Image (cartoon, coloured by chain):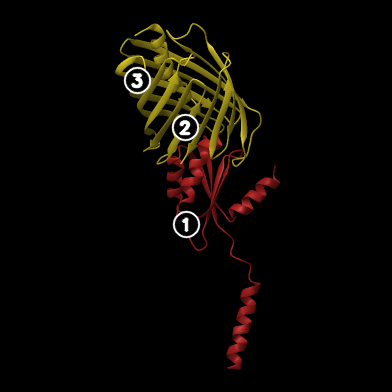
Amino acid sequence: MTHVLRSLAVAALVAASLPALAATSIKATVNGMVCAFCAQGIEKRLSRLPASQAVFVDLKRKVVVVEAKEGQTLDEKTITAEITDSGYDVVKLETIAQSVAEFKAGAKGRK
Amino acid sequence: MSKAAARLSCATLALAASLVGAAPMGFKDSTMAMVDLGPDWKEVWVNHAFTARDAVGAGAIAMRSEDGARKRTLLEANYTRLLSRWNLPEAQANVWLFAGVGGIRGNDFSGTRFALAPGIQVDYETTRVYAAVTGRLYRAEDLNHDYASVRLGFSLYEADYDEVQPWIVVEARRMRNLSEKTEITPLLRLVHKRFFVEAGVNNSRQARATLMYVF
């Protein structure tokens, strides 16, 4: 019993010391985004995706960042289709190990 | 139909065309609503984008002459088609087609007159510059008018997606057989991701305000 409790305590200490799993997002470079009123469709459509945790539209850098919910995966084809149905063209997709909040903070720091 | 009444009817149709120039439809599966208010005309329309390039809708206009004696109401069903779009790294350009069909009623004639209004618009926009050219034909019994407008605008500064961005836009328009002069309207435009607002006063000292919203 003491051995079991000791093992559990060690496991708990090890788990607490591990870094939190990094958030995963897909960053899309998009052509045609010149107007917030017109680009709102991107945010609205991507926010409705079941695996979508948060969405960030950056008109100045022409990118859209979609953060995945913990434990879920974002489908690149679906994201491309939603942006296309919003009226824009995706020219590049990449996966980044950042949450939307982290990306926004980094973007503000680069201003 | 008297000349004054004909001009009034035509102005009603022409007004509907000029307001389309701002943003004629939303994204796929969205519904866009617009309200335009002025001393002599009030307009409301709504359209639904059933694809990324097609929208159908309906609109209503209530208009009166300057002396308040003559009144018109127009009900219109319309179709908007995004014919071509160029999404560039720093700009967007579009060619739109419009098709309207409706009926006009007035307090000085009986019945409803059937009207058709096909048109085209070409526009170009960056985050700082906007330009649009619009032309529409209007055909109704005893009415045969062409309409053309040019809009040029610039933004005072570039804004983030969730900020309000102010623009200065100037519109020049002519309406055949309606007016001898070119109407010039400077407008202040405020654009946010949730709403689009314009307000201005034309060279006849008439104020105008427009609000658009996408659901």
> Which numbered tag is attached to residue B104?
3
Q: Which chain is yellow?
A: B
Q: Earlier in the sequence, mark 2 or mark 3?
A: 2
Which element is circle 2 on? Answer: strand
For marks 3 and 1, give the one nearer the viewer: 3
Which residue has dot 2 on it? B34
Element under label 3?
A: strand
Judge whether A87 appears above or below B64 on screen. below
Do callouts 3 and 1 mark residues in contact (Cβ within 8 Å)? Answer: no
Up-down: is B34 above or below B143? below
Q: Amino acid at mark 3?
A: Ile
The residue marked by circle 3 belongs to what chain?
B
Q: For the N terminus of chain B, which image quadrant?
A: top left
Q: Measured from the top left, where is residue B53 in percent x and y?
A: 39, 33
Packing grade of label 3 (10 A; few <14, some 14-19, many >=20) is many
Element type at mark 1: loop
Task: Name the foreground residue: B46 vs A51.
Answer: B46
Residue at x-position 57% and y-position 39%: A62
On the question of residue B81 being in view, the answer is no
Residue at 51%, 26% in the rendered image: B37
The residue that label 1 is drawn on is A51
Amino acid beneath label 1: Ala
Q: Amino acid at mark 2?
A: Met
